[in-house]
Image (spheres, rainbow, N blue to C red):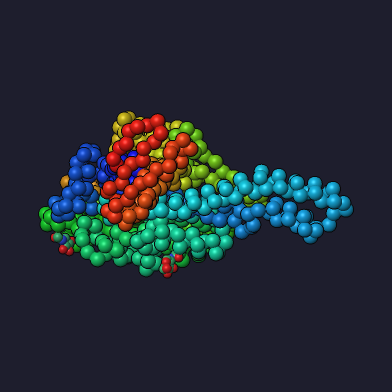
Amino acid sequence: MSPATLLRNALRALIPLAVACTFYLYLYPVFLGCAFPLPQTEDNVAAFQDTVRQHVLPHSSIAAPFRLLALGDPQLEGDTSIPNYNRESFPHLTWAIRHLTYKTDHPSLRKRLRQVVHDIVDVFFDDIPDTLESIRKRIDLFGNDFYLAHIYRTLRWWTKPTHVTVLGDLLGSQWIKEKEFNRRSWRFWNRSFKGGERVPDEVAAYPAEEYDLAGLLGVEDDNAAAWRRRIINVAGNHDVGYAGDLTVERLERFERVFGKAAYELRFELPITNPAANATIYNEETNPDSDRLAPELRILNVNNMNLDTPAADQSLQDKTYAFVNDVINTATAVEYQGQFTLVLTHIPLYKPEGVCVDAPFFDFHAGGGVKEQNHLSADASRGFLEGIFGLNGDPGAPGHGTGRKGVVLNGHDHEGCDTYHYINQKEEGEERQWRVTRWPTAKADELPGKSGVPGLREITVRSMMAMYGGNAGLLSVWFEEDTWEWKYEFATCALGRQYFWWFVHVFDLIVILATVVYVALRAAVAAGFDIDRWPATKTDAPPVTVSVTPNGNGVKAPVRAGNGEAKKV
Ligand SMILES: *[C@@H]1O[C@H](CO)[C@@H](O)[C@H](O)[C@H]1NC(C)=O
Ligand SMILES: *[C@@H]1O[C@H](CO)[C@@H](O)[C@H](O)[C@H]1NC(C)=O
């Protein structure tokens, strides 16, 4: 068989495989059946079908009016993870040469040579492995940017979210200098989250009694299109530092590039049914109603410095003022029709064994939180009892049942889905906040149980390759008959980076092989004598081959001991 024929046969098998793998990779959410949950049904197939419908017949879709693509901890790494960054790659080789060329001081030739031998050994045992690892890491970082981009781009295209959030730890280290911070920011916006935009400062509002709406849900306008591009970035410990590291400079550079670290967004869902609309509370015409115009309140809470001690007291005071203003500007718990979605980074407190991460705190020698896995139990109660108004005391406003909502966060890369609750029937010390996994809570029928206020907290698994390139899909919708918001959460994971790498390298090889094949054919067509293997075996007799201009008349060589001559 000639080289061209061999290549052609190989390509016949490889091209379909490459096409299939590429199709799978580029359409992975379709193959995995990923979709935002649909209102009022747990049917994944129906949700998938509706996503297809959104691509084909957008107006017939019954998708939830709020669909949030939630991504956890991309953690863009950079210079800090490259061993030989900013220093020479073969320091021992340099030293060996300096010793050899008498650029160093040595009392004797013997000692000089001994040093040279030492350095040469180190070249093999230190420099080469170190350089190889550095090269590997650089390639890995480069590929990782595009791997993350693949997740963002593909899911945004397929699942059609109305909003997108990255739940903190956008970057991999809070210690990086300005230059590296700018480099990673560039990679974030121009590579991994290309097409995304930071939330404008004038839209990211401070909590207030009177506010401008950030937009309407379920209404297709310019504003809705702008929200599809925007990314609600949450500040994480690797972006701005824990309380013990959080300084004005770190916070400022984060806010400059990624958007404010603490704000609220209020979206309203217009009620089109006049009869339902008429039941909404109105000071003059309908003062007895407990129904408010349906509103979704998104709170982006920077919870990095809720716990003490903090490096910068004034920043911590600001965070506390923010949380208090969130509480003070919330509607009274007795009213229906509002939904609070908290986006934050560090998960709420939970005892060991509920999620992968157990409670953990570490402090700097001079004071200041150095690291924490969860918020403290007190700070967590600030969310449950403050922002959400849940209470163990049935005599509390609204019987302590609190506001409807959900908390989304990151930090714990493994992810976790939990339910915090407090049993009002328990007495004294017994009555305290408890937490269990969401599936257990559902099996025990805890959510919605009378006398047991509770709140779901979803810790979104990281989108990093080592955690499988995960993404969260949160749907929130409104039910007019009960005047309640409902929500459901699904996930979609691309899988580790190996397949992403394999497909791209494989495609490259197949493309190169195709080019070589075409070149071979062209060369043969042009009359070059290459359409056969060179006779390399010493026992093969020299053969003369006559070549005709169109290359088709080549006679195959006759090998010694192999009387069969095949026409190619
Ligand atoms: C992204 O690239 C554009 C164009 O090169 C540049 O103006 C912008 O500053 C970049 N973004 C970041 C965050 O570096
Ligand atoms: C709903 O009622 C409000 C007044 O409470 C009114 O301004 C609005 O136009 C009504 N919307 C519809 C669709 O009827």
Given residues 320 and 368, the one toward you in this image is 368
Q: Answer with left or right where residue 110 lies relative to residue 408.
A: right
Could you say where residue 376 lies in the image, as x and y percent from the top left? 51, 44
Given residues 492 and 142, the one toward you in this image is 142
**Residue at image coords 12%, 55%:** 273
- In this view, which residue lies farthest toward the bottom? 202
Which quadrant would the N terminus be assigned to in this image? top left
Residue 71 visible here: no
**Residue at image coords 21%, 56%:** 218
Image quadrant of residue 176?
A: bottom right
Could you say where residue 62 lies in the image, as x and y percent from the top left? 17, 49
Q: Is residue 228 above or below residue 44?
A: below
Image quadrant of residue 59?
A: bottom left
Could you say where residue 100 lies in the image, as x and y percent from the top left? 77, 55
Report ligand 1 position as a quadrant.
bottom left
Q: How many marks?
A: 0
Which quadrant would the C terminus be assigned to in this image? top left
Residue 89 visible here: yes
Given residues 273 and 464, the one toward you in this image is 464
**Residue at image coords 49%, 59%:** 184
Q: Answer with left or right where residue 371 lies relative to residue 4.
A: right
Could you say where residue 152 lies in the image, as x and y percent from the top left? 35, 53
**Residue at image coords 41%, 56%:** 192
Given residues 566 and 387, the one toward you in this image is 566
Q: Is residue 260 above or below residue 504?
A: below
